[in-house]
Amino acid sequence: MYYVALGDSISIDDYTGVRGGGAASQFARRIGADPFRNLTRDGNVAEGVLQDLERIEGRPDLVTLTVGGNNLLLGDDPEGIFLKIRQIAERLASYETTVILNTVYDPTDGNDAMAERLGLAPDLRERFEGVNQGIREIAGKYGFILSDLEELFHGHGALSQDPWYVMVIEPNLAGATAIARHWEALLTSQ
């Protein structure tokens, strides 16, 4: 199975403390992907993913996409983020491949006081909810598999007893492992 990972630091190895510990790398091993192309990058935004699409060689059998969180942190308008993700989705749909599209997780577990304590923008909640609603709509429109990381990570926020984050917004090894298992479960249930 030819698997391509696209997106941001939700998928990368860097913050897990383990070589190959990121969600995409773990998932590739779990499903026996060969070849596996990890085109994810720390700090990647939707515009970057649009450029990364040009780096895909051939037609992948499977694509995971984690995108939108960095755009939110940069203060981008949810409608603009939604439009860029829709452009990415249109391009991926042309491959006629299986796509796992992910919502953006919330390191605050929905707690605005925690968001303020972590230094996140006061209006982030409303924009966050708007982007995730757009992602859900895009998944439905294009027949992508929806991976609701917001729901999966709830209760494991940065200040919880069992955090799945490091550096406020990056998935730790436990978080990356949870994502890889979640993607595998979604894929095998199709």
Image: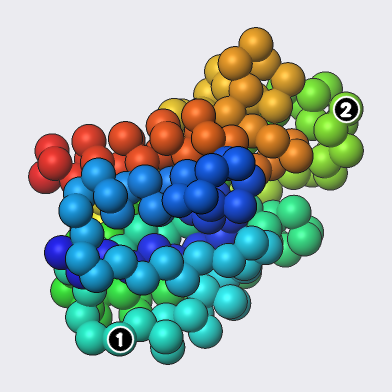
Visible residue check, residue 109: no
Across and down, in percent, residue 84 comes to 53, 73
Amino acid on which the number 2 mark rests in the picture: Arg
* Mark 2 closeness class: few <14, some 14–19, many ≥20 residues within 10 Å: few
What element does badge 1 sit on? Answer: loop
Q: Secondary structure at mark 2?
A: helix
Which mark is on residue 117?
A: 2
Tag 1 residue: 57
Image quadrant containing the N terminus:
bottom left
Mark seen at residue 146? none
Residue 159 figure quarter: top right
Placement of 162 over or under 14, stated as above or below: above
Q: Nearer the viewer, mark 1 or mark 2?
A: 1
Q: Residues within 10 Å of mark 1 (few under 14, many from 20)?
A: few
**Mark 1 residue type:** Glu
N-term mark: 1 or 2: 1
The residue sitting at the front extreme is 19
- Quadrant of residue 148 in the image? top left
In the image, 23 versus 142, the foreground residue is 23
Image coordinates of residue 26 in percent, x first then y, are 36, 46
Colour logic: rainbow
In percent of the image, x 35 and y 58: which residue is there? 64
Report which quarter residue 157 is drawn in: top right
Mark 1 and mark 2: span between their CA atoms?
43 Å
